[in-house]
Structure formats: C-alpha cells, structure tokens
Image: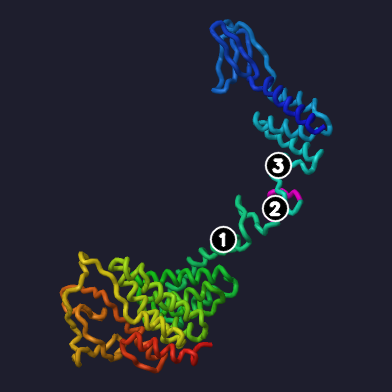
C-alpha cells in the first residue's frame, strides 16, 4: 500500500509539472507568440505580465489566446485528489509547491503529512524538526534543550549572552570612569575615592570590566610615554582590581607586574601577588621565562623583539624573586644568561669587545654594579658586555649575550646562596636541596 501511495504521489508531481510548468497564458501573434499572464484586455490592446516585465500588445496583432492553468490552480486540483491518509502524497505535493515557490501551501502539505504520520522523517525535516532522544523537536526546542538562548538572530550560550550584555554596559562605564579619573587630583588616594564613588554598589560586573579596561588603557598610554604622570592613578586602579574575584582580574595584576613602565606600579602588583602565596603565580612568571628564552625571540626575533624579550625576562625574574617561591630556581638559572642570534648583516652587530663600566678588572673578571646597586663579578669574555651597556656612546650596541641581573638577584634571594654566574652550580645546589622546598 505504501509503494502504491508513493507511485500516486510521484504521478501527481509529473502531472502537475506537465500542467503547471508553463505560464498562465500563451498569446499567439501574427509573427510569433508571447507567454505570460494577461493583466488587462481591451479592444485595442492587451497587457501581459511576462518573466521580464509587463508588455503591451496591439490587439490587431493577436491571432489567438491559449489559456493555461496557473500553479495555484494545479495545486488545488492535485490537493483535492489526495487521499485522507496519504502522508507520502501530501509530502510529494509539498515538494512540488516548494519548487513552484508556493511556500505557504508547501508548509500546509508537510503539516498534513505529519498529521497523518507523526514519524514521517522527510516531512519533519522539511519543517525544521530535529530528532533528539527519540523525540521530534522544533529547532527552537532543540536549541533550548542544548542550553542555548536566543539573542537577536543568533543562538548563543547564556555565558556568551551575559558577556555581550556586560560588554555593552561596560562601554558606558568606561566613558564615565575616564571622565571621573581625569577631573581631579591624580594621587592614589584621590583617584580611589572618586572611582569608588563613581562605581558605587550598582555597577556590578560591567563596572569591574570597565575598571580593567581603563587600567589597561592607562598602562598602554604610559608605555607610549604620553601619561607617565598617572602612575599613582594606576596604582589606585590596580588596588581596586586586586579586590575583584576571578581570573580576569588576576590576569590584569600579573600583566601589570610585567608591562607597566613604572617601577612603583610593578612593585605594588608583585606585592599583591606575593601575598596570595599561590603556585599559579610562580608558574605564570616561569612560563614567561620559558617563552622569552625560546626560539621565537632568541633566534628569529628582530631587534625590537629582542629588546622586549630582555625587558620581560628581567621583570619576570624580579617578580619571581619577590614571590619567594624557591621552585623557580631552575628556570631562573636557565634565564640568567641568554644568547640571542643577531644576523651578521644587521645594523646592530656589536663591535669587538670593550667594557665601558669604569669598573675594576680583577683576574679576568669585572666587578659590575647593576641598576639596583648590587655588586658582583662576571668574567670578561671577548665579544660580550652582558647587555649592560656599550663602550661607544656614539653608537647603540646590542650584545648577543644577555646577562639577566634580575635573575641573578632573585637566585640569591630565594636560595640564600651565591654561585655567581655559574649556572651548573645553581642547578646542582637546587637538585641537592629541592626536597627541602617542594611540597
């Protein structure tokens, strides 16, 4: 019975195509013919709607008019012939209606098919149903069952919707915070009072997002040397961000510990991280040491990338020294000396070795004072100045071998030892004593 029904259904489609593929009317002229739908007819002219537009024919040129059934007429005829229980027939007629752009009628036929056979898979799929856990669900029901929510014309997760809404609200708070920070004294206490009053108790998560956004903007401005006077203001925002919960706030504090050009701001950031006593903070800065001693910066970087790498390596090492976690010792030992590859034809290739420290040489070594007043001896090796300055004031010299005084200082602070520049000695000491420190 089912195969017979399918045969009838496809017979309907074939007949409908035969009757309905032509347009409504064929007007035979003395010199040809025109196919279309007659819109109006008088004794002198005939207006016809064709696929390319309306045309007006002279009635005297018309020989005869051949009337054809319209697709809607064909549809009505075929729908009347379908059996009351012929689900496949209704589905087939729906396909034909879709092809003829009779979309409303097609929908009715698909609905009729599933009314007769609720599990008619093809009709269900045409209507947008999805089979989930042996149940047919509409697209909306299926998306909702998967945990999605509607936002405009798209389906998103509730977290994505909330993030988008918070971002829109945060943009308004960003503008308010910029104005609030700029309208008074830039001391840390004054900025804290103004920002706290601005945000109040109603800002919520959008206010927190805005605070982090403005803080990042101020760091970028300071890096560009446009607003270094705002250092205390950045400290105020940093302290407020440090009170926030969540990984985004922590990430901003960590980034400030490396990226802010102010020693004071970086110092506050590192102190707040040290107070957390979290191994994740140690892992973050050790990760920076690994990344910036990797091939991307050490072998493939240009002069600017190498400059950034030196700065990050020094600051990350300083931060690890303040965190007080001895587990950073192996990474610090590896990062104490870094050799960068500099192409031979580069403008920054260093000249022959000369040390311009005005320091005393002692037995093949030189006593060097770093930027914090720490004094230590390093060996004199041809072709290096350990990244501590060049001998020729007329020329900026980049040394391929970088001595990270921040790592050396952190090693001494974390271990209470001093093995000078001897990486092997530092590592040997660590592996002998690590069980005293590892949890």
Residues shaded magenta: 135-144
Q: Position of residue 406 (x, y in %)?
A: 35, 84
Q: Are marks 2 and 1 in contact (CB under 8 Å)?
A: no
Percent across and percent down for residue 268 are 44, 83
- Helix, strand, or loop for circle 2? helix
Q: Is residue 200 left or right of residue 226?
A: right
Q: Which residue is mark 1?
A: 164
Q: Which sits earlier in the primary sequence, circle 2 or circle 1? A: 2
Of residues 248 and 41, which is closer to you in this image?
Answer: 248
At x 61% / y 12%, what residue is drawn?
Answer: 27
State the residue position of label 3.
127
Above-or-below relation of 10 to 356: above
Mark closest to the chain's N terminus, 2 or 3: 3
SS assignment at label 1: helix
Q: Is residue 415 above or below residue 207?
A: below
State the image coordinates of residue 149 (x, y, percent, origin top left): 65, 57
Q: CA distance from mark 2 to mark 3?
A: 13 Å
Residue 140 included in the magenta stretch of the image: yes
């Amino acid at each position: 019975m089912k195969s017979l029904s399918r045969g009838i259904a496809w017979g309907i489609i074939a007949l409908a195509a035969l009757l309905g593929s032509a347009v409504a009317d064929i007007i035979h002229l003395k010199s040809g013919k025109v196919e279309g739908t007659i819109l109006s007819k008088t004794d002198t002219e005939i207006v016809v709607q064709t696929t390319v537009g309306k045309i007006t024919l002279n009635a005297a040129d018309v020989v005869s008019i051949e009337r054809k059934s319209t697709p809607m007429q064909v549809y009505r005829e075929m729908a009347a012939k379908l059996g009351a229980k012929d689900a496949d027939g209704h589905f087939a007629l729906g396909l034909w209606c879709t092809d003829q752009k009779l979309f409303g009628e097609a929908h009715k036929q698909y609905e009729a098919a599933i009314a007769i056979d609720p599990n008619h898979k093809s009709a269900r799929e045409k209507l947008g149903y999805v089979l989930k856990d042996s149940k047919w669900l509409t697209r909306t029901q299926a998306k909702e069952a998967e945990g999605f929510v509607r936002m405009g014309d798209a389906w998103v997760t509730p977290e994505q919707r909330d993030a988008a809404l918070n971002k829109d609200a945060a943009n308004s708070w960003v503008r308010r915070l910029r104005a609030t920070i700029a309208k008074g004294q830039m001391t840390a206490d004054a900025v804290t009072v103004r920002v706290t009053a601005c945000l109040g108790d109603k800002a919520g998560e959008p206010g927190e997002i805005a605070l982090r956004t403005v803080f990042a903007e101020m760091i970028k401005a300071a890096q560009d040397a446009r607003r270094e006077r705002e250092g205390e203001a950045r400290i105020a925002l940093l302290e407020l961000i440090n009170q926030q919960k969540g990984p985004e706030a922590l990430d901003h504090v960590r980034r400030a510990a490396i990226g802010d050009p102010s020693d004071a701001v970086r110092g506050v950031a590192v102190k707040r991280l040290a107070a957390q006593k979290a191994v994740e903070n140690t892992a973050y800065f050790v990760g920076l040491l690994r990344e910036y001693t990797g091939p991307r910066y050490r072998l493939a970087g240009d002069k600017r990338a190498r400059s950034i790498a030196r700065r990050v390596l020094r600051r990350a090492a300083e931060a690890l020294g303040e965190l007080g976690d001895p587990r950073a010792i192996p990474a610090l030992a590896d990062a104490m000396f870094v050799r960068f590859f500099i192409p031979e034809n580069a403008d920054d290739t260093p000249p022959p070795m000369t040390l311009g420290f005005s320091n005393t040489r002692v037995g093949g070594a030189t006593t060097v004072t770093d930027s914090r007043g720490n004094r230590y001896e390093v060996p004199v090796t041809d072709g290096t100045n350990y990244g501590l300055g060049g001998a020729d004031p007329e020329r900026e010299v980049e040394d391929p071998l970088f001595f990270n005084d921040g790592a050396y200082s952190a090693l001494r602070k974390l271990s209470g030892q001093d093995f000078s520049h001897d990486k092997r000695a530092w590592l040997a000491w660590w592996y002998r004593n690590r069980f005293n420190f590892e949890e």
